[in-house]
Image (cartoon, rainbow, N blue to C red):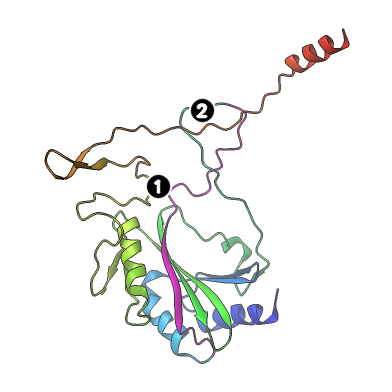
Amino acid sequence: MTESVTHLATTLAERFSDVLISCVTDRDETTLVIPAEHLLSVCGVLRDDALFAFTQLSDLCGVDYSTYGQVDWATNEATTTGFSRGRSANTPQHSANVDDNAVDDHAVDQRFAVVYHLLSIQHNTRLRLRCYLTGEHPRIASVVNIWCSADWFEREAFDLFGILFEGHPDLRRLLTDYGFIGHPFRKDFPLEGNVEVRYDPDKKRVVYQPVTITNRVLVPRVIRDDTRHVAAKEDQSDA
């Protein structure tokens, strides 16, 4: 781990000790987690304070943690409900002024999160900032007035996850159709969608219709302890 990364984590933990949830460095990447209600004040300091000078927002995205931690692929039995690869447990290399038990800071009732990736050109450092959200209609303040590049990023997160960014000047869907129902990156959204869109040559327009495809359940190779067929094959080869 580089000295600059460790110094950044320590400085962040000291500067935001009154609102900090966690500040963890792992694989030379620093992640700062704060309450959503303190987002604007913290972001203002991260941009304007010369110690940080994070003048560029490189990316912003939403996350749905509703199936977080499920590792269904580790199985010795078949299933008809499908599988997910889940996550791997990692031990962070450095935790600045934070209890090690607080590293996995995600709570069960915090389904959604917004993640901000910041760049300081002056110090040549990067920072991941994360805020957890609750409720079926999660809300968080818009950072458009701090970083103008957040405009379309927030519209994308609203479109795909249904996260409402309060104060956004033009919060509209960005990638889906005007009449689209639901938010396709939510874990409870069906993979095959709710409706199909096609062009009707008779009506000479685009029409919506019920989905005609079915979701294919992924089934991994099941580990079997029965090796009788292997022994039978060896007996045949010996004969």
* Quarter occupied by residue 220: top right
Query: Tag 1's secondary structure?
Result: loop
Main secondary-structure element of the magenta-colored stretch: loop
Which residue ends up furthest to the top in the rendered image? 239
Q: What is the C-alpha distance between the residues marked 2 and 1? A: 19 Å
* Residue tagged 1: 187
Mark before the other along the chain sequence, 2 or 1 = 2
Inspect the image, locate mark 2, and give the three-letter code of the amino acid beneath it.
Thr
Instruction: Please provide percent x and percent y for residue 93.
Output: 68, 67
Instruction: Say above or below: 210 vs 160.
Output: above
**Region of the chain picked out in magenta, as a range:** 51-77
Instruction: Please provide percent x and percent y for residue 112.
Output: 40, 58
Query: Tag 2's secondary structure?
Result: loop
Q: Quick check: is 70 in the magenta stretch?
A: yes
* Residue tagged 2: 79
Is the residue marked by circle 2 packed among few (<14), some (14-19), or many (20+) residues within 10 Å? Answer: some
Instruction: Say above or below: 167 vs 189.
Output: below
